[in-house]
Image (spheres, rainbow, N blue to C red):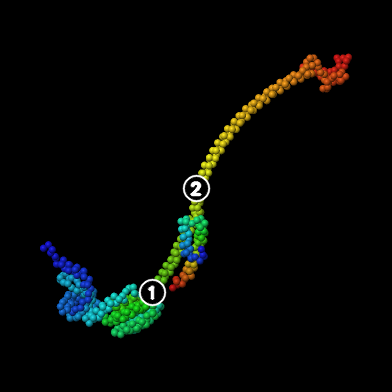
Amino acid sequence: MSKNVSFEQAMIRLSEIIESLERNEKDLESSIVLFEEGLTLVKQCDKQLKSFETKVSELMVKYNDDTEST
Amino acid sequence: MNNVWTVSYLLNTIKSTLDQNVLLKSFLIKGEISNFTSHSSGHWYFSLKDEQARISCVMFQGYTKDVLFRPKNGDKVLVRGAITVYNLQGQIQCSVFSMQNDGLGDLFIQYELLKKKLFDEGLFDDNHKRILPKFPNKVGIITGNNTAALQDILKTINQRWPISEITVYPSLVQGEQAPKSIIRQLLKADKNNDVLILARGGGSIEDLWAFNNESLARVIYNLETPIITGVGHETDTTIVDMVSDYRAPTPTGAAQVAVPSIIETKRVISQFKIDLTSNIKNKLIQKNNQLNQYKQSRFIVAPQNIWQYHQLELSRLSQQLSQQNLVVQHHNTRLNQLRSALNQRALMYTKLYEQRLNQLEVKLNNTILKSQEKNQYMFKNSINMLNAYSPLNSLARGYSIVKQENQIIKLIEDVDYSKELEIRLYDGIIHSKPFKKGENHE
């Protein structure tokens, strides 16, 4: 699992992990590895989403005045 | 005589029979006008005839207003019409939609033939038509120099989209040389503009004839730049209009299509901004919800779910194992049975030996008792012997023992006269005071 996974990819992977755990097809060791990956992805997605939200609010502040005045 | 038709039925039958033939619904017919009458309602009634035949015709007011000349008896004309049955007169008549006078009749036929040819070749196909650019920077206008059409176009563009760069390609728009001139300017304008407008103001059919030119149509078809045409009035449809990417009814109409309205565009942009903002916000919310849903997964919330299955599996296995234990238990039970059997047997033997031991003990006791009795008897004998030699027996026979301070007095001289004497008789002791001989005590 590399750091430069896109948000979308991370979300897809996360849903795969949960599905896999749900299907209970892996042995316990692998499940724990998946669990750890899942938690890492949750953290990553959370962080990315938060940064997206921040970015959107920043952009809106930055560009709002311009478009309003035209 | 049971199949008697009414007149109406007959005429209706004829009518429906004729209606089934599509060829009779729209056809071109050439003939000479006779019995022409213009009714006050605006409808025209006349006959068309040739050397051998004639047919009654009607042209309603809705169509007559588009006829560019006033027909009169003897005019040779070309008309487009359809066959109808007029019940009131019991007549088959031609309902006329359009009329050209004879001089133009040949042109009209040419036009129709060219139109069919180009149509068959696919020059009018919708899927060949290019999409007009929404926001063209460069607009090329091909039209007559100093014409009202040009003024209309320039005015419209400047009102709607003043930022576009306009190039005018002046051209002849009428007469024999017009098609060549237009072609030359089109080729010059092609590739140097985002969109082209080919336009001409209204005029007679002859005036517009340059726009029914085959070479021109083919050049337009092969242009790379999307082209809008606005030739004549709304009712005029030229070959050029049919082959162009967009047919506007008038030059002004062409300009309206060529460029967007700046007011409308501003409105669209502000709407875009609203949409954009709400879209991205919705997307964020949606993704957030999705992520939350993932976070709510029972594996994330309660990770024990991950190994719960394995735990169940473990307890299942341990149960199986404990069933294996039953076998061991069985052996254990058997072992215990054997052990207790062994114990009982051992106990039995122990009791047996205990009994024997008791018997022996009793025997031994008896033996000891006998030897004790014997010893007792011997002991009594000894005592009797001892008694026989005891001093007490002498006392019984009348002897006494005198003691002074626990010393037996055997001689007179041993007596201390100041001290008490103890005289032991057989049955008791007498305490007395000794007296010296001759001494009277009283």
Using the image, tell me which numbered label, if any, was put on residue B320. 2
Q: Position of residue B259 (x, y in %)?
A: 37, 76
Task: List the residue tagged with mark 1.
Answer: B134
Q: Looking at the picture, does residue B428 appear above or below residue B138?
A: above
* Residue B252 visible (yes or no): no
Q: Type of residue at label 2?
A: Gln
Q: Foreground: B273 or B388? A: B388
Q: Residue at x 15, y 67 (%)?
A: B10
- Crowd class of label 1 (few under 14; some 14 to 19; many from 20; radius 10 Å): few
Q: Are marks 1 and 2 on the same chain?
A: yes
Q: How far from the left and from the top, in percent, is residue B56?
A: 17, 75
Graded by Cα atoms within 10 Å as few (under 14), some (14 to 19) or many (20 or more), the crowding at tag 2 reads few
Is B136 left, or right, of B62 in this rendering? right
Name the disc covering residue B335, or none.
none
Asked whether the residues under the numbered discs 1 and 2 touch, taking CB atoms below 8 Å apart as contact, a structural biologist would say no
Residue B212 quadrant: bottom left
From mark 1 to mark 2, how far is it between C-alphas?
77 Å
Q: Is residue B118 left or right of residue B284?
A: left
Residue B396 in sight from this viewpoint:
yes
The residue that appears at 64% across and 28% down in the rendered structure is B361
B373 is higher (above) or lower (below) than B119:
above
